[in-house]
Image: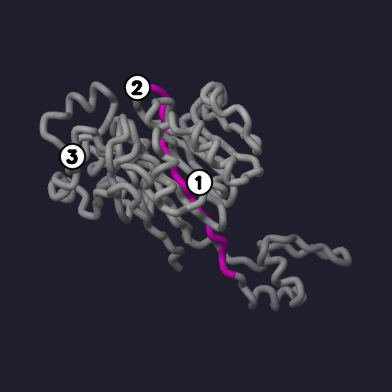
Amino acid sequence: MLDLCLLGTGGMMPLPGRWTTSLMTRYNGSSLLIDCGEGTQVALKKTGWSFKPVDVICITHFHADHIAGLPGFLLTMGNADRTEDLLIIGPKGIERVVNSLRIIAPELPFKIRFYELTGDFETIEACGYTIDAFKVHHRVVCYGYNIRIGRQGRFDAQAAREQGIPLEYWNRLQHGETICEDGICYTPEMVMGPPRKGIKVTYCTDSRPVKAIADNAVDADLFICEGMYGEDGKESKAREYRHMTMYEAAKLAAEAGPKEMWLTHYSPSLVRPDEYLPKVKQIFANTKMPKDGWMKTIDFVD
Protein backbone atom coordinates (compact mmCIF):
# COMPACT_ATOMS: atom_id res chain seq x y z
CA MET A 1 0.00 0.00 0.00
CA LEU A 2 0.98 3.62 -0.56
CA ASP A 3 0.41 6.35 2.03
CA LEU A 4 0.27 9.92 0.84
CA CYS A 5 -0.25 13.37 2.31
CA LEU A 6 -0.90 16.63 0.49
CA LEU A 7 1.19 18.77 2.82
CA GLY A 8 0.13 22.12 1.36
CA THR A 9 -2.45 23.34 -1.13
CA GLY A 10 -1.45 26.95 -1.82
CA GLY A 11 0.05 28.60 -4.86
CA MET A 12 2.47 31.51 -5.05
CA MET A 13 2.93 32.10 -1.31
CA PRO A 14 2.18 30.53 2.07
CA LEU A 15 -0.84 31.89 3.92
CA PRO A 16 -2.13 31.44 7.47
CA GLY A 17 -3.61 27.94 7.39
CA ARG A 18 -2.41 27.17 3.86
CA TRP A 19 1.16 26.19 3.01
CA THR A 20 2.56 25.99 -0.51
CA THR A 21 1.66 22.91 -2.51
CA SER A 22 3.71 19.76 -1.92
CA LEU A 23 3.08 16.03 -1.70
CA MET A 24 4.71 13.32 0.38
CA THR A 25 4.33 9.58 -0.15
CA ARG A 26 5.44 6.62 1.97
CA TYR A 27 6.03 3.10 0.69
CA ASN A 28 7.88 0.20 2.25
CA GLY A 29 9.83 2.43 4.63
CA SER A 30 10.85 4.97 2.00
CA SER A 31 9.40 8.48 1.61
CA LEU A 32 9.24 10.66 -1.49
CA LEU A 33 8.56 14.40 -1.61
CA ILE A 34 7.33 16.42 -4.59
CA ASP A 35 8.21 20.13 -4.31
CA CYS A 36 9.46 21.98 -1.28
CA GLY A 37 8.25 25.56 -1.06
CA GLU A 38 8.43 27.94 1.85
CA GLY A 39 7.05 26.28 4.99
CA THR A 40 7.00 22.70 3.70
CA GLN A 41 8.95 21.44 6.70
CA VAL A 42 6.39 23.06 9.03
CA ALA A 43 3.58 21.34 7.13
CA LEU A 44 5.39 17.99 7.41
CA LYS A 45 6.03 18.50 11.12
CA LYS A 46 2.28 18.93 11.67
CA THR A 47 1.59 15.49 10.18
CA GLY A 48 3.86 13.65 12.60
CA TRP A 49 5.64 11.97 9.69
CA SER A 50 9.43 11.71 9.80
CA PHE A 51 12.03 13.65 7.81
CA LYS A 52 14.65 10.92 8.03
CA PRO A 53 13.26 8.37 5.51
CA VAL A 54 12.88 10.90 2.67
CA ASP A 55 14.94 9.19 -0.04
CA VAL A 56 13.74 11.10 -3.12
CA ILE A 57 12.76 14.73 -3.72
CA CYS A 58 11.17 15.63 -7.06
CA ILE A 59 11.07 19.30 -8.07
CA THR A 60 8.55 20.37 -10.71
CA HIS A 61 10.18 23.71 -11.62
CA PHE A 62 12.33 26.53 -10.32
CA HIS A 63 9.79 28.98 -8.93
CA ALA A 64 10.20 29.92 -5.29
CA ASP A 65 6.88 28.50 -4.09
CA HIS A 66 8.11 25.07 -5.22
CA ILE A 67 11.74 25.03 -4.08
CA ALA A 68 12.55 27.89 -1.67
CA GLY A 69 11.94 25.71 1.39
CA LEU A 70 14.62 23.19 0.40
CA PRO A 71 17.62 24.50 2.43
CA GLY A 72 15.75 24.33 5.72
CA PHE A 73 14.22 20.98 4.82
CA LEU A 74 17.67 19.51 4.09
CA LEU A 75 19.05 20.84 7.38
CA THR A 76 16.17 19.28 9.28
CA MET A 77 16.80 15.96 7.53
CA GLY A 78 20.42 16.20 8.68
CA ASN A 79 19.33 16.97 12.23
CA ALA A 80 17.20 13.81 12.08
CA ASP A 81 20.46 11.82 11.78
CA ARG A 82 20.05 10.90 8.15
CA THR A 83 23.29 9.64 6.59
CA GLU A 84 22.03 7.77 3.50
CA ASP A 85 22.30 9.36 0.05
CA LEU A 86 19.41 11.57 -1.10
CA LEU A 87 18.24 11.66 -4.74
CA ILE A 88 16.91 14.98 -6.08
CA ILE A 89 15.16 14.94 -9.45
CA GLY A 90 14.30 18.07 -11.42
CA PRO A 91 14.60 20.00 -14.68
CA LYS A 92 17.94 20.70 -16.29
CA GLY A 93 19.91 22.91 -13.92
CA ILE A 94 18.64 21.25 -10.74
CA GLU A 95 22.16 20.64 -9.41
CA ARG A 96 23.18 24.27 -9.97
CA VAL A 97 19.99 25.62 -8.37
CA VAL A 98 20.15 23.36 -5.32
CA ASN A 99 23.84 24.04 -4.76
CA SER A 100 23.11 27.77 -4.92
CA LEU A 101 20.41 27.41 -2.28
CA ARG A 102 22.81 25.38 -0.17
CA ILE A 103 25.01 28.40 0.44
CA ILE A 104 22.96 28.70 3.64
CA ALA A 105 23.00 24.93 4.24
CA PRO A 106 26.55 23.91 3.29
CA GLU A 107 27.19 21.03 5.69
CA LEU A 108 25.00 17.96 5.53
CA PRO A 109 25.72 14.45 6.89
CA PHE A 110 24.49 12.83 3.68
CA LYS A 111 25.38 12.98 -0.01
CA ILE A 112 23.01 14.42 -2.59
CA ARG A 113 22.76 12.75 -5.99
CA PHE A 114 21.06 14.59 -8.83
CA TYR A 115 19.02 13.46 -11.82
CA GLU A 116 18.52 16.22 -14.39
CA LEU A 117 15.52 15.90 -16.68
CA THR A 118 16.03 16.92 -20.29
CA GLY A 119 13.44 15.01 -22.33
CA ASP A 120 9.69 15.24 -22.73
CA PHE A 121 9.25 11.95 -20.83
CA GLU A 122 11.70 10.08 -18.62
CA THR A 123 11.39 7.19 -16.19
CA ILE A 124 13.52 6.76 -13.06
CA GLU A 125 13.58 3.75 -10.72
CA ALA A 126 14.37 4.62 -7.11
CA CYS A 127 13.70 3.05 -3.70
CA GLY A 128 10.80 0.90 -4.88
CA TYR A 129 9.18 3.77 -6.79
CA THR A 130 8.86 4.04 -10.56
CA ILE A 131 8.84 7.77 -11.29
CA ASP A 132 7.68 9.08 -14.67
CA ALA A 133 8.52 12.72 -15.37
CA PHE A 134 6.54 14.36 -18.17
CA LYS A 135 7.00 17.88 -19.48
CA VAL A 136 4.06 20.29 -19.15
CA HIS A 137 3.49 23.90 -20.27
CA HIS A 138 4.37 26.67 -17.81
CA ARG A 139 6.33 29.94 -18.12
CA VAL A 140 9.52 28.04 -17.27
CA VAL A 141 10.47 24.41 -17.87
CA CYS A 142 8.15 22.35 -15.69
CA TYR A 143 7.40 18.66 -15.18
CA GLY A 144 4.55 16.61 -13.81
CA TYR A 145 5.17 13.24 -12.19
CA ASN A 146 3.64 9.79 -12.04
CA ILE A 147 4.48 7.84 -8.91
CA ARG A 148 3.97 4.16 -9.64
CA ILE A 149 4.32 1.10 -7.43
CA GLY A 150 4.63 -2.12 -9.38
CA ARG A 151 3.32 -5.47 -8.20
CA GLN A 152 4.69 -8.81 -9.29
CA GLY A 153 2.51 -11.71 -10.39
CA ARG A 154 1.38 -14.60 -8.22
CA PHE A 155 3.63 -17.59 -7.57
CA ASP A 156 2.44 -20.57 -9.63
CA ALA A 157 3.03 -23.66 -7.47
CA GLN A 158 1.62 -25.98 -10.12
CA ALA A 159 4.10 -24.69 -12.70
CA ALA A 160 6.92 -25.23 -10.23
CA ARG A 161 5.85 -28.84 -9.61
CA GLU A 162 5.40 -29.60 -13.30
CA GLN A 163 8.92 -28.35 -14.02
CA GLY A 164 10.38 -30.38 -11.16
CA ILE A 165 11.73 -27.37 -9.30
CA PRO A 166 12.84 -28.39 -5.78
CA LEU A 167 10.63 -27.03 -3.01
CA GLU A 168 13.55 -25.39 -1.21
CA TYR A 169 14.04 -23.06 -4.21
CA TRP A 170 10.47 -21.77 -4.36
CA ASN A 171 10.82 -18.92 -1.88
CA ARG A 172 14.05 -17.68 -3.44
CA LEU A 173 12.53 -17.72 -6.93
CA GLN A 174 9.48 -15.86 -5.64
CA HIS A 175 11.81 -13.11 -4.41
CA GLY A 176 13.44 -12.68 -7.80
CA GLU A 177 16.54 -14.85 -7.43
CA THR A 178 17.89 -17.00 -10.27
CA ILE A 179 19.28 -20.32 -9.03
CA CYS A 180 21.76 -22.49 -10.91
CA GLU A 181 22.67 -25.94 -9.53
CA ASP A 182 24.29 -28.93 -11.24
CA GLY A 183 24.14 -27.28 -14.65
CA ILE A 184 20.41 -26.44 -14.36
CA CYS A 185 19.15 -22.88 -13.96
CA TYR A 186 15.79 -21.90 -12.52
CA THR A 187 14.50 -18.36 -13.12
CA PRO A 188 11.60 -16.43 -11.54
CA GLU A 189 9.88 -16.26 -14.94
CA MET A 190 9.40 -20.05 -14.77
CA VAL A 191 7.11 -19.81 -11.74
CA MET A 192 5.70 -16.28 -11.57
CA GLY A 193 2.47 -15.20 -13.26
CA PRO A 194 1.98 -11.91 -15.15
CA PRO A 195 2.37 -8.67 -13.19
CA ARG A 196 -0.72 -7.59 -11.26
CA LYS A 197 -2.18 -4.09 -11.18
CA GLY A 198 -0.04 -1.74 -9.15
CA ILE A 199 -0.65 1.74 -7.76
CA LYS A 200 -0.41 5.00 -9.69
CA VAL A 201 -0.59 8.63 -8.55
CA THR A 202 -0.31 11.47 -11.08
CA TYR A 203 0.75 14.92 -9.89
CA CYS A 204 0.77 18.15 -11.89
CA THR A 205 0.84 21.82 -10.95
CA ASP A 206 1.66 25.05 -12.81
CA SER A 207 0.66 24.28 -16.37
CA ARG A 208 -1.82 24.96 -19.07
CA PRO A 209 -4.07 21.96 -19.82
CA VAL A 210 -1.98 20.02 -22.31
CA LYS A 211 -2.45 16.53 -23.76
CA ALA A 212 0.54 15.10 -21.88
CA ILE A 213 -1.26 15.59 -18.56
CA ALA A 214 -4.37 13.68 -19.58
CA ASP A 215 -2.27 10.95 -21.23
CA ASN A 216 -0.31 10.39 -18.03
CA ALA A 217 -3.35 10.49 -15.74
CA VAL A 218 -5.01 7.56 -17.53
CA ASP A 219 -5.70 4.73 -15.05
CA ALA A 220 -4.40 6.77 -12.10
CA ASP A 221 -5.74 5.83 -8.69
CA LEU A 222 -5.40 9.50 -7.78
CA PHE A 223 -4.87 12.55 -10.01
CA ILE A 224 -3.61 15.63 -8.14
CA CYS A 225 -3.87 18.70 -10.34
CA GLU A 226 -3.60 22.44 -10.14
CA GLY A 227 -6.87 24.34 -9.78
CA MET A 228 -5.48 27.86 -9.50
CA TYR A 229 -8.69 29.74 -10.21
CA GLY A 230 -12.37 29.08 -9.69
CA GLU A 231 -13.87 32.52 -10.21
CA ASP A 232 -15.53 33.53 -13.45
CA GLY A 233 -13.42 35.72 -15.69
CA LYS A 234 -10.04 34.27 -14.69
CA GLU A 235 -9.51 32.34 -17.93
CA SER A 236 -7.40 35.04 -19.56
CA LYS A 237 -5.21 35.35 -16.46
CA ALA A 238 -4.71 31.58 -16.42
CA ARG A 239 -3.62 31.68 -20.05
CA GLU A 240 -1.29 34.64 -19.48
CA TYR A 241 0.54 33.09 -16.53
CA ARG A 242 0.36 29.49 -17.83
CA HIS A 243 -1.87 28.15 -15.08
CA MET A 244 -5.16 26.23 -15.05
CA THR A 245 -8.65 26.93 -13.86
CA MET A 246 -10.44 24.29 -11.81
CA TYR A 247 -12.71 23.60 -14.77
CA GLU A 248 -9.81 23.03 -17.15
CA ALA A 249 -8.36 20.54 -14.66
CA ALA A 250 -11.73 18.79 -14.42
CA LYS A 251 -11.87 18.45 -18.21
CA LEU A 252 -8.45 16.77 -18.16
CA ALA A 253 -9.74 14.36 -15.52
CA ALA A 254 -12.87 13.64 -17.53
CA GLU A 255 -10.66 12.79 -20.51
CA ALA A 256 -8.18 10.64 -18.56
CA GLY A 257 -10.63 8.85 -16.28
CA PRO A 258 -8.68 8.53 -12.99
CA LYS A 259 -10.50 7.07 -10.02
CA GLU A 260 -10.35 10.38 -8.14
CA MET A 261 -9.03 13.93 -8.58
CA TRP A 262 -7.74 16.30 -5.89
CA LEU A 263 -7.36 19.96 -6.80
CA THR A 264 -4.54 22.01 -5.31
CA HIS A 265 -2.31 25.09 -5.83
CA TYR A 266 -5.13 27.50 -5.04
CA SER A 267 -4.62 31.19 -5.76
CA PRO A 268 -4.12 33.35 -2.64
CA SER A 269 -7.30 35.16 -3.69
CA LEU A 270 -9.35 31.98 -3.12
CA VAL A 271 -10.47 32.18 0.49
CA ARG A 272 -12.95 29.28 0.18
CA PRO A 273 -11.97 27.09 -2.78
CA ASP A 274 -14.71 24.59 -1.95
CA GLU A 275 -17.34 27.14 -3.04
CA TYR A 276 -16.58 26.11 -6.62
CA LEU A 277 -16.72 22.36 -6.05
CA PRO A 278 -20.34 21.80 -7.19
CA LYS A 279 -19.61 23.39 -10.57
CA VAL A 280 -16.39 21.38 -10.96
CA LYS A 281 -18.23 18.15 -10.11
CA GLN A 282 -20.51 18.74 -13.07
CA ILE A 283 -17.45 18.11 -15.26
CA PHE A 284 -15.74 15.37 -13.20
CA ALA A 285 -17.91 13.94 -10.45
CA ASN A 286 -15.23 12.40 -8.23
CA THR A 287 -13.37 15.65 -7.55
CA LYS A 288 -12.20 16.61 -4.05
CA MET A 289 -11.11 20.01 -2.82
CA PRO A 290 -8.46 19.16 -0.21
CA LYS A 291 -7.14 21.24 2.62
CA ASP A 292 -3.58 21.10 3.92
CA GLY A 293 -2.68 17.79 5.50
CA TRP A 294 -5.18 15.60 3.65
CA MET A 295 -4.08 11.97 3.76
CA LYS A 296 -5.00 8.86 1.84
CA THR A 297 -3.88 5.23 1.77
CA ILE A 298 -4.10 3.44 -1.57
CA ASP A 299 -4.16 -0.34 -1.31
CA PHE A 300 -3.30 -2.90 -3.95
CA VAL A 301 -6.37 -4.39 -5.61
CA ASP A 302 -6.43 -7.95 -6.94
The colour scheme used here is one colour
Q: Give the secondary structure at mark 2.
A: loop
Q: Which of marks 2 and 1 is nearer the N terminus?
A: 1
For numbered disc 3, what is the local secondary structure? loop
Query: Where is residue 72 drawn, in percent x and y?
Result: 49, 34
Dot 3 or dot 2: first in sequence order is 2
Q: In this view, does 182 lie to the left or right of 173?
A: right
Q: Which amino acid does label 3 sit on?
A: Val
Quarter the C terminus occupies? bottom left
| Foreground: disc 3 or disc 2 | 3
User: Mark 3 — residue?
Assistant: 271
Residue carrying label 2: 139
Q: Name the residue under label 1.
A: 32
Q: Please rate how many residues cluster around mark 1, counting C-alpha atoms within 10 Å: few if below 14, some from 14 to 19, many from 20.
A: many
Q: Which residue is drawn at 57% across and 61% down?
A: 152
Stretch in magenta: 139-154
Q: Residue furthest right?
A: 182
Q: Between marks 3 and 2, how big is the CA–CA gap?
A: 25 Å
Q: Quadrant of residue 203?
A: top left
